C-alpha cells in the first residue's frame, strides 16, 4: 500500500495477507486492516477511524465537525463485512443528492474525522431530507443515544473496537437504527398501537403488522419506556404492555398480554424487548391441525384463536382442551408439557389423534423460543406399492391408491391388508396399539411377499407397505428345481435360474 500523487509515493509497511492484522497508512488518517468475515475469502479494508453502519430504512447524510465530507467512494455495502455469501450481487451503497453524499440503507461509510476522539466524545452530524445538519455527541462505547432529525427519531449505538496488531488502532463503529422496531413472530396479521409511557392514549399511533414481518418506527423518542397493545383481525384490543427499549433501568424487558377474537378463548402473547430497539411479539405455543379432518380445538368450551391455515394460538394452561367436530366434542386432553413430548386426543366419533410438541424453527433473527404443537392422525397408512391396497381396521375397510397415504377415520387395535389385484386373502392381523412392537417384517400372501414397516414418530404410527422383501432365495442350479421350507411355512418351489422373495 502506498500513498502520494504522480510518481512520488510513500510506501508503508507491508500488510500480511496470511493473518488478521492492521497498520496505519503513513501521512494519512487511514487504517488498513485484513479481515476474514467469510470462510471463502478475505477483505482488505482501508478506512478512517469512524465507520457508520446505516441500519435504518432512510438515506442519511453524514459528516464529522470540521472534517471533509463523506465521499461516495468511501461507502460500501455492509454485507462485505459480515458472514454472508461474498458472491451475491450487491446494490448501491450511496447516492449523491443535491451535492451531498447519502449513505443508503444496509451500507457502511468511512466518515473522515478532524480528530481521533481521544476526549471520549465522538461528534457526528446527520442530515435527512430537509438539508439541515443536526449535530450530535456520542458519549463512550456501548452507549445508546437518541437523535432527532426533522420530526424523526433515530438511535445511534457507538461501539469502540481495537484493530488487530501491529497497529492496534481504536475504531469508532456507529450503528444508526430506527427509534423502535416492532417485530411480529406471529402466524397471523396484527394491529399495533404504541406510544411513549406518559403520553396520552389519544396520542398513540397505529400500524398494521403482517405475519413474520418487521416495522421500523421513527416517531417515538427512545430510549425509554414504550407502551403498546395489539389486536388480531376482528379481535379486541389487549391491555397495554410497558416495555423498556434500550434502557434496562427504565422498566421491564418482557411482559405477557392476552388477545382474543370474538367467541374465542384467550391466547397468551409475549412482548419482549431486545437489543437495538427491537420489540418482538410472539405466541409461545402454536397448535397446528394436520389431520385433514377440519377440526376445531376448544379450551374451557371456547374455541382457540384461529390464526388461519389450520394454526391456533394457545394460552398458558396445558389442560382443559377438547377436539370439536360437527358431530360433537371429544374427551378432554392435555397439551404436552415440554419439547419433544406427546399426548393423545380423540374426536367424538373415536378417531385417535397424536398431539406432539417440537421446537419451532426460528424464522426471524432474535426470535423468542417457541414450540409447535402438531395434531396428526394416530395411525397413517402409506401404500408404497404399484397396486391398489385394501386395509381393514376393525370392521371398516379403506382403499389406498399406489403411492398415497391415508388416515382411517376409526382406530382399531389391529390392522390387516390385501392387494386387490393379487389375492382375495387378507394378511395376518398386525398390532397397531400404543407400545406394540415396531420395525420391519416381511409377510407372504400366497406366492407374493410384502414388507411392512411400523414406524413410530412422537405418538403417531406410520404403517408403510412395500412390495418384495429383504430376504430371497436364488436357485443357481441349471436343471434342478429347488424346494425350500422356511419357518414352518409351506414348501416353496424355485425353478432353475429363478429368484423368489420370502417372508
Image (tube, grey):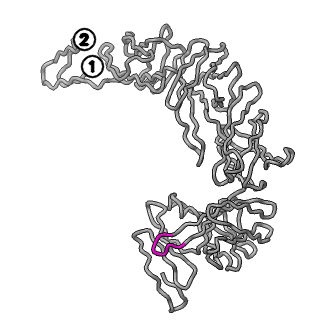
Residue drawn 75% across the image and 48% down it: 226
Q: Do the residues labelled 2 and 1 touch (CB within 8 Å)?
A: yes
Question: Dot 2 lies on which element?
Answer: loop
Considering every residue shown, the one lying at the far top of the view is 395
Real-space CA distance between mark 2 and mark 1, rounded to the nearest whole angstrom:
10 Å
Q: In which quarter of the image is the C terminus?
A: top left
Foreground pick, 19 / 146: 146
Query: Relative to 107, is 288 above or below?
Result: above
Q: Quadrant of residue 265?
A: top right
Residue 165 placement (x, y as % from top left) = 46, 72
Q: Is the magenta stretch mostly helix, strand or loop?
A: loop
Crowding around mark 2 (Cα neighbors within 10 Å: few <14, some 14 to 19, many 20+) is: few
- State which quadrant residue 269 falls in: top right
**Residue 128 placed where, x, y %?**
76, 66
* Residue 86 coordinates in the image, percent (x, y): 50, 61
Residue farthest to the bottom, as pictured:
7
Image check: 461 left or right of 253? Answer: left
Bounds of the magenta span?
163-169
Q: Which of marks 2 and 1 is nearer the N terminus?
A: 2
- Residue 390 image label: none
Q: Which residue is drawn at 78% across and 33% down?
A: 234
The x, y position of residue 167, in whole percent, is 49, 75
The residue carrying pointer 1 sits among few (fewer than 14), some (14 to 19) or many (20 or more) residues within 10 Å by Cα, namely many
User: Circle 1 — which element?
Assistant: loop
- Residue positioned 75% across, 39% down in the render: 230
| Along the viewing direction, whichever of 192 and 166 lies nearer the viewer | 166
Residue of label 2: 489
Task: Give the residue number, with chain letter if any, for mark 1.
Answer: 502
In the image, 359: left or right of 467?
right
Amino acid at each position: 500500500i502506498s500513498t502520494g500523487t504522480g510518481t512520488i509515493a510513500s510506501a508503508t509497511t507491508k500488510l500480511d495477507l496470511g493473518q488478521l492484522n492492521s497498520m496505519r497508512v503513513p501521512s494519512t488518517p487511514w487504517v488498513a486492516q485484513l479481515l476474514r468475515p467469510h470462510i471463502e475469502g478475505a477483505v482488505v479494508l482501508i478506512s478512517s477511524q469512524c465507520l457508520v453502519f446505516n441500519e435504518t430504512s432512510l438515506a442519511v447524510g453524514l459528516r464529522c465537525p470540521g472534517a471533509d465530507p463523506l465521499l461516495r467512494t468511501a461507502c460500501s455495502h455492509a454485507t462485505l463485512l459480515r458472514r454472508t455469501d461474498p458472491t451475491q450481487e450487491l446494490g448501491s451503497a450511496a447516492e449523491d443528492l443535491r451535492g451531498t453524499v447519502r449513505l443508503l440503507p444496509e451500507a457502511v461509510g468511512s466518515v473522515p474525522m478532524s480528530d481521533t476522539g481521544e476526549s471520549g466524545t465522538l461528534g457526528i452530524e446527520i442530515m435527512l431530507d430537509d438539508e439541515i445538519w443536526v449535530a450530535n455527541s456520542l458519549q463512550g462505547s456501548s452507549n445508546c443515544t437518541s437523535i432527532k432529525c426533522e420530526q424523526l427519531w433515530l438511535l445511534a449505538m457507538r461501539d469502540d473496537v481495537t484493530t488487530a496488531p501491529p497497529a492496534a488502532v481504536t475504531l469508532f463503529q456507529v450503528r444508526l437504527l430506527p427509534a423502535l422496531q416492532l417485530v411480529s413472530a406471529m402466524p397471523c396479521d396484527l394491529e399495533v398501537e404504541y406510544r411513549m409511557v406518559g403520553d396520552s392514549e389519544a396520542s398513540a399511533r397505529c400500524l398494521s403488522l403482517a405475519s413474520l414481518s418487521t416495522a421500523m418506527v421513527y416517531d417515538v423518542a427512545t430510549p425509554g419506556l414504550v407502551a403498546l397493545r395489539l389486536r388480531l383481525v376482528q379481535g379486541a384490543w389487549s391491555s397495554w404492555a410497558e416495555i423498556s427499549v434500550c434502557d434496562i433501568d427504565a422498566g421491564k424487558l418482557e411482559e405477557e398480554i392476552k388477545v382474543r377474537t370474538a367467541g374465542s378463548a384467550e391466547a397468551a402473547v409475549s412482548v419482549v424487548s431486545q437489543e437495538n430497539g427491537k420489540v418482538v411479539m410472539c405466541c409461545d405455543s402454536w397448535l397446528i391441525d394436520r389431520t385433514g379432518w377440519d377440526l376445531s380445538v376448544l379450551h374451557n368450551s371456547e374455541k382457540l384463536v384461529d390464526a388461519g391455515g389450520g394454526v391456533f394460538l394457545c394460552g398458558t394452561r396445558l389442560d382443559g382442551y377438547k377436539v370439536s367436530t360437527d358431530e360433537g366434542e371429544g374427551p378432554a386432553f392435555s397439551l404436552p408439557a415440554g419439547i419433544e413430548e406427546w399426548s393423545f386426543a380423540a374426536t367424538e366419533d373415536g378417531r385417535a389423534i397424536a398431539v406432539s410438541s417440537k421446537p419451532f424453527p426460528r424464522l426471524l433473527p432474535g426470535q423468542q423460543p417457541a414450540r409447535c404443537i402438531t395434531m396428526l392422525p394416530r395411525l397413517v397408512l402409506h401404500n408404497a406399492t404399484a397396486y391398489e391396497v385394501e386395509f381393514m381396521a376393525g370392521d371398516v375397510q379403506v382403499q389406498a391408491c399406489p403411492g398415497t397415504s391415508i388416515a382411517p377415520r376409526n382406530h382399531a387395535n389391529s390392522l390387516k391388508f390385501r392387494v386387490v389385484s393379487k389375492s382375495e386373502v387378507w394378511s395376518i392381523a398386525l398390532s397397531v396399539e400404543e407400545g406394540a412392537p415396531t420395525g420391519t417384517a416381511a409377510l407372504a400372501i400366497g406366492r407374493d411377499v410384502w414388507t411392512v414397516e411400523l414406524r413410530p414418530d412422537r405418538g403417531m404410527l406410520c404403517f408403510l407397505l412395500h412390495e418384495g422383501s429383504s430376504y430371497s432365495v436364488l436357485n443357481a442350479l441349471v436343471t434342478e428345481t429347488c424346494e425350500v421350507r422356511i419357518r414352518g411355512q409351506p414348501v416353496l418351489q424355485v425353478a432353475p435360474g429363478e429368484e423368489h422373495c420370502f417372508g
